[in-house]
Image (tube, grey):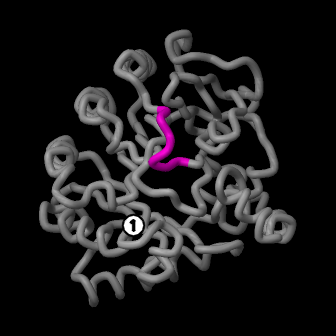
Amino acid sequence: MTRDETAILQINVGLLCNQKCRHCHLDAGPHRSENMDRATAEQVIAYAERSGFDIVDITGGAPELNPNLEYLVERLSEIASHVMLRSNLSVLGNGQKDRLIEKLASRRVAVVGSFPSIDELQADAQRGEGVFASSIAVLQKLNRIGYGQEGTGLELNLVVNPTGAFLPPSQEQSAKRYRDVLKRRWGITFNQLFSFANVPIGRFRRWLMDSGNFEAYMEKLARAFNPCAVEGVMCRTLVSVAWDGYFYDCDFNLARRIPMGGKKKVHVSEMPEKPAPGIPIATADHCYTCTAGVGFT
C-alpha cells in the first residue's frame, strides 16, 4: 500500500489519560507519563506551518491533560482551517477545563467525543464507574455554548465502538439510534457519528488473548475484509506524529512503534515537508480493522 496526497497532520500529544478503557489500543491511562513537551510542540507547529497542513487532528491519551494543549490549539488554529480535538468527554467535566472549552469554541475547534454506548452500565463497565454520567453532563455543556447546534459552526461529532470482540453495527443505524435517544432522554444534539471497530493491539489485544477471543476476532476481521475500503483508509492521507516528535503512518502503527514506511524513525525537526505520494505504508495484522466492512475512516 502507498500514500496518496497527505492532507491531515495527526498529533498524539501523549498517553496520559484520566481513564483506563479496556479497548484502548495505546494502553493510555493515569499511570502513563509520556506527554509532548513544549520544545517538541514548537517543532510540530513549525512543521505544520512549513508543510501547509490545512487539517490538524489532536489526539492522546486525553490530550486535555497535556499542559501545552491550549498553546497548540491557539497556534495551530492560525495555520490550519480545520482543527479537531479527540476527547473522551469525561476529562472536560467538573468545571476544571472550562477555560479550555472556551478556547476551543473561540478557535472553532471541532470536538470529536468518544462515547461508546448509550447504555450507562455498558459504558461504565468499559470506561470506569461514573464516566457515562460525566460524559452526558459534558455533552450538555457543549450544546449550551453552541457545539452541535445548527448555524453556530461549532462541530460536535461522536465516536462509538463495540464493547466486546465483535464488529460495530451499521454506522447509519447507530447514528439514528444515538440521535433519537440522546435527544429524547437528555436533550443532546450532535453533528455526525462515526462507528469504529476495536483495534486488536494494546490493552484490547491483551483482553482478547486473556479471554480466548483473539483468534476468532482476527478471523472475523479478515473475513470482513473489503478491498473497496483500502482506497479510503486514513494512513493514505494522514501522517501521525507522536509525543516525542517521531512520525508514524497512523496512530495504530504508533501504538506498535512501527515507524513511518516501516523504515528508520524520522523526527519532526528533520522532516522538510509532507510525505510524498507513492511512499510505501507499513502494514501489519491490525490493518484488517481499517479494511473490515465499510472501513474505519
Magenta stretch: includes residue 32: yes
Q: Position of residue 150 (x, y in %)?
A: 20, 67
Q: Taking 107 as reference, is 45 above or below it?
A: above
Q: Position of residue 233 (x, y in %)?
A: 64, 49
Quarter that holds the N terminus: top right
Which residue appears at 42% of the width and 22% of the height?
Answer: 44
Q: Nearer the viewer, residue 129 or 119?
A: 129
- Image side of residue 251 versus residue 201, left or right: left
Q: Is residue 4 left or right of residue 120?
A: right
How far from the left and from the top, in percent, is residue 149? 20, 67
Q: Amino acid at mark 1?
A: Gln
Residue at 46% across, 43% down: 60
SS class of the residue under badge 1? strand
| Displayed quadrant of residue 143 | bottom left
Quarter assignment of residue 81: top left
Report the residue at 40% width, 65% height from top: 158
Q: Quick check: 220 above or below 107?
A: below
Q: Quadrant of residue 227?
A: bottom right
Q: Which is more toward the observer, 139 or 55?
A: 139
Image location (x, y in percent) of residue 226: 77, 63
Quadrant assignment for the C terminus: bottom right
Asked whether residue 242 is in view, the answer is yes
**Residue extent of the magenta highlight:** 28-34
**Rendered residue at 56%/37% (across/down):** 238
189, 265: nearer the viewer: 265
Chief SS of the magenta region: loop
Decide whether residue 160 is among the magenta residues: no
